[in-house]
Image (cartoon, rainbow, N blue to C red):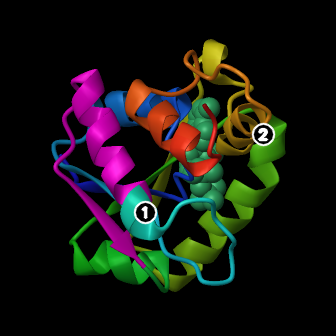
Amino acid sequence: MPKAIYPGSFDPITYGHLDIIERAEKIFDDLIVGVVENPRKETLFSPQTRKELVEEATSEEGINVSRVITFSGLLVNCAKKYNRKSIVRGLRANSDFEYEFQMALTNRDLAPEIESVFLMTSGEYSFLSSSIVKEVKGLGGDVSSFVPQVVERRLVEKFDLK
Ligand code: ADP
């Protein structure tokens, strides 16, 4: 069974991401979650905190991942470095499709031996994004049905709520 990497910003990780990780774990023997460090993209949490939250959230939910890493630069170079032949991505409504399609074709051009694999979102998470979570929590709302407790706690600290 090929080894895979699931890359993303995870700013922060949500139940939508966790659902993809849990399902990808059943397909691949060995799954790395790759937290992107992109200095051009503004994030709420640092790469290190986003990585810790992926580790803590997967452990809180009892989901087994081989390893969580941070990486910068081209995804295909990271995939090669860790000997991954598959890139896992999640697909929500058609809003994800154009971007994912473009990225998958670009990555195939850069590294034809690496395949992008798309897992369809579960209906209950089809509307869920890290941006929505940040918006709701930033306004003091309850996000407990969107993210695990460890993540909600970190959001409360970050937004200086309570
Ligand atoms: P990126 O900046 O790389 O898009 P994200 O953390 O936003 O990083 O998303 C990482 C991957 O997880 C993407 O493939 C995205 O489509 C997928 N994803 C995010 N939220 C969900 C969700 N609720 N259901 C399914 N897939 C999701």
Part of the protein shown in magenta: 50-71
Based on the displayed image, in which of its 4 quarters is residue 72 positioned? bottom left
Is residue 54 covered in magenta?
Answer: yes
Residue 8: % across, % down: 52, 57
Residue situated in front as seen by the camera: 144 or 77: 144
- Give percent across and percent down for residue 92: 70, 34
Q: Residues within 10 Å of mark 2 (few under 14, many from 20)?
A: few
Q: Where is residue 104? Give x, y as percent.
A: 61, 63
Please tell me which residue lies in front, 23 or 86: 23
| Mark before the other along the chain sequence, 1 or 2 | 1
Q: How many tags in the picture? A: 2
Say whether residue 33 is magenta: no
Q: In this view, does 36 lie above or below 25?
A: below
Q: Which amino acid does label 1 sit on?
A: Val
Residue 74 percent across, percent down from the top left? 49, 83
Q: Is residue 90 shown to the viewer in this render? A: no
Question: Which of the two marks, 1 or 2, is nearer to us in this view?
Answer: 2
In this figure, which residue is indicated by the disc labeled 1?
Answer: 35
Q: The disc labelled 2 sits on which kind of residue?
A: Glu
Q: What element carries label 2?
A: helix
The residue at 70%/42% (across/down) is: 134
Quick check: 66 left or right of 55?
A: left
Left or right position of 88 against 158: left
- Image position of 37 with respect to 59: above or below: below
Label 2, on which residue?
A: 135
Element type at marker 1? strand
Residue at the (22%, 33%) spot, across then down: 59
Image quarter (top left, top right, bottom left or bottom right) of the C terminus: top right
Q: As drawn, is 105 to the left or to the right of 148?
A: right
